[in-house]
């Protein structure tokens, strides 16, 4: 399977520009899940900018109906 890096970068909402996984979704998911985190693209913009990618933060946003 080929990575669709160009298409992924067009849609990537992560604000951490120096991330080596930016646009490589499979690597991003593996990295964050190993740390008990959710990738930034799952969060609303203001929440993504906090860089709190924890499951708990994501769950709070779901409970608040922000996701």
Image: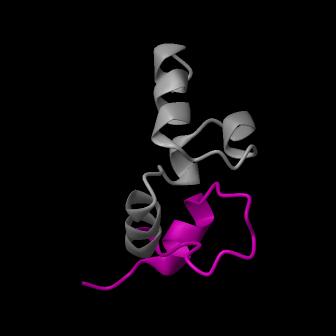
**Percent x, y for residue 13?**
64, 54
Quarter of the figure with the N terminus: bottom left
- Residue 20 position by quadrant: bottom right
Instruction: Name the residue: 46% across, 28% down.
Output: 59
Q: Nearer the viewer, residue 14 or 37?
A: 37
Q: Is residue 47 left or right of residue 4?
A: right
**Percent x, y for residue 57?**
56, 33
Q: Decide whether residue 11 is among the magenta residues.
A: yes
**Percent x, y for residue 33?**
39, 58
User: Which residue is most to the bottom?
Assistant: 2
Q: Nearer the viewer, residue 6 or 67?
A: 67
Instruction: Name the residue: 57% across, 40% down.
Output: 43
Q: Is residue 38 left or right of residue 20?
A: left
**Percent x, y for residue 28?**
47, 68
Instruction: Name the residue: 59% across, 70% down.
Output: 9
Q: Nearer the viewer, residue 59 or 12?
A: 59
Give the colouring mode of the picture. one colour
Q: Is residue 62 above or below residue 11?
A: above
Q: Which residues are magenta?
A: 1-25
Q: Decide whether residue 40 is among the magenta residues.
A: no
Q: Is residue 8 left or right of residue 45?
A: left
Instruction: Name the residue: 46% across, 61% down.
Output: 32
Q: Is residue 6 above or below residue 31?
A: below
Secondary structure that dominates the magenta span? loop
User: Which residue is most to the top?
Assistant: 64
């Amino acid at each position: 399977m080929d990575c669709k890096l160009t298409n992924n970068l067009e849609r990537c909402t992560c604000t951490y520009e120096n991330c080596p996984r930016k646009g490589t979704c499979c690597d991003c998911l593996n990295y964050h899940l190993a740390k008990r985190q959710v990738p930034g693209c799952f969060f609303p913009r203001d929440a993504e900018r906090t860089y709190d990618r924890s499951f708990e933060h994501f769950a709070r946003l779901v409970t608040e109906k922000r996701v």
